[in-house]
Amino acid sequence: MKTKTLYLFAMLLGLLCLAQPAFADDTTYSGSFLSRSTMTGDWGGLRNQLAAKGVTFDVNLVLTEQGVVDGGTNREWENGGRGDLLLKVDTGKLGLWPGGFLTAELEGNFGKGVNLRNGGLSAVNTNQIFPIPGEENLLLPALNLTQFLSEYAGVVVGKLDTVAGGDMNEFAHGKGDTQFMNLALNLNPALLLTVPYSTLGAGVIILPTKDFNAAILSFSVVSAVGDANHSGFGELNSGKLTYNAEGRVRTDFLGMTGHQLAGGLYSNKDYNSIDQRVSLSPGSNSIAKKTDSWAVYYNFDQYLYEPVKGSGKGLGIFGRFAATDGNPNLFQYFYSLGVGGKGVMASRPHDRFGVGWYYLDIKSPTFTGPLATRELLRNEQGVEAYYSVALTPWAHLTPNIQVIHGAQEKTIALLPADRKDIDTATIMGLRLQFVF
């Protein structure tokens, strides 16, 4: 079964590399079925009219087939998917009030993934963990208002999708829809302990130059215990908050577009310590706590080839770094580097590709018993490569391969004799994205 699947995978990849579909470089809602930017088009003109009034609907569906073909803990293939509907309203264009931007997001996933089958901590299919890992559901992870008070400053309040709004990167960002599939190459995993994906929050946005794309500073306070399955009001607690400051600036190194981003965060929540002790004395055992957590982080992206400056097309490099307290955050240091690009070939303006590497320096949790201390994890690293073939501007087929040397050394078992070594895992996948 595995050989047949890999054979079909290779044949399909070869055929797609030879294909040369004809569609325009710049697309809109209108146009022919194969050239417009969305499958469903302009809805008889209604979609363009709504967009002119500041109302847009972005509908996205991703289907994934993925399997561990070597190493790991289980070599079966799984398939699943995620749907996402994003509504944005510009209140000024709609004639309500100036400077307001409403955002609502509806999201759900289905099927299964292989995130727990490679021995790693970083999910090999980011798309499958939203809105909540391991659950088939349809939820509202974002509902918020951004209100600009002047050309230089604004505020945001409500239920926030923190993945969409923070730690931006031109070549490595998102939920695994369009670029990399591995979480460590889409996000900074060192921030996940203290910044929930979907949570109540409020913040201030500052634009030093009035240009949103040139430079932006943000300061926010969010609930450290939010999730997409609850409104969050019942969980609001002054002792469970995360404070975050971040700045991003556009650069002009080598005469081409780039960005530099730096940030820091602090949480006052009580967390479980990664070091636990067990005593033989009755009543003396309790879960050890660790108060507060902090992290600092940095990322950059830089075009090395950019035919038209600011077009979002070309070839470039990216990288990320983070340092944390090491307890309760077990990801003490994080590094990633890679290459990414879009539309490098004029004949294929919508194709995307990337090659990336990540390294998780893990402060291994320890379990100290009456006789010995046991460390549970090792450091983790992995590489990923993908090529996203644009069948049309609204349909992308993406072969993907990852090699992960996971943090988990052995399978969990009650008896030491039943534990088995987890070898470096090779994961292959095929992702199909539709934009409606």
Image: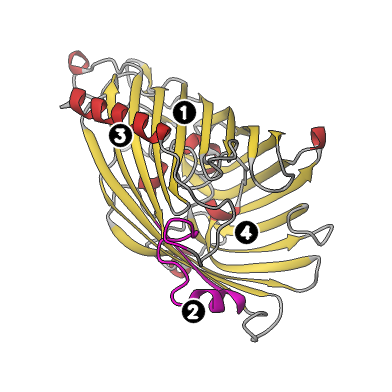
How far, Cα to Cα, is label 1 from label 4? 36 Å
* Residue under the point 23% across and 34% down: 77
The quadrant where residue 399 appears: top left
Depth check, mark 1 against mark 4: the one in front is 1
**Callout in the foreground (2, 4):** 2
**Residue lying farthest left?**
1
Q: Does the stretch in magenta take in 265?
A: no
* Mark 2, residue position: 46
| Image location (x, y in percent) of residue 300 | 68, 36
Identify the mark at residue 342; answer none if there is no mark.
Answer: none
According to the image, label 3 marks what residue? 116
Looking at the image, is mark 3 or mark 4 earlier in the sequence?
Answer: 3
- Identify the residue shown where x is 62% and y is 43%: 169
**Classed neighbour count for the residue bearing mark 1: other residues with Cα under 10 Å, few (<14), some (14–19), many (≥20):** many
**Residue type, mark 2 in image:** Leu
Instruction: Give the magenta range.
Output: 32-60
Q: 160 or 88, which lies in front? A: 88
Give the mark, 1 or 2, whose residue is nearer the N terminus.
2
Mark 1 lies on residue: 385
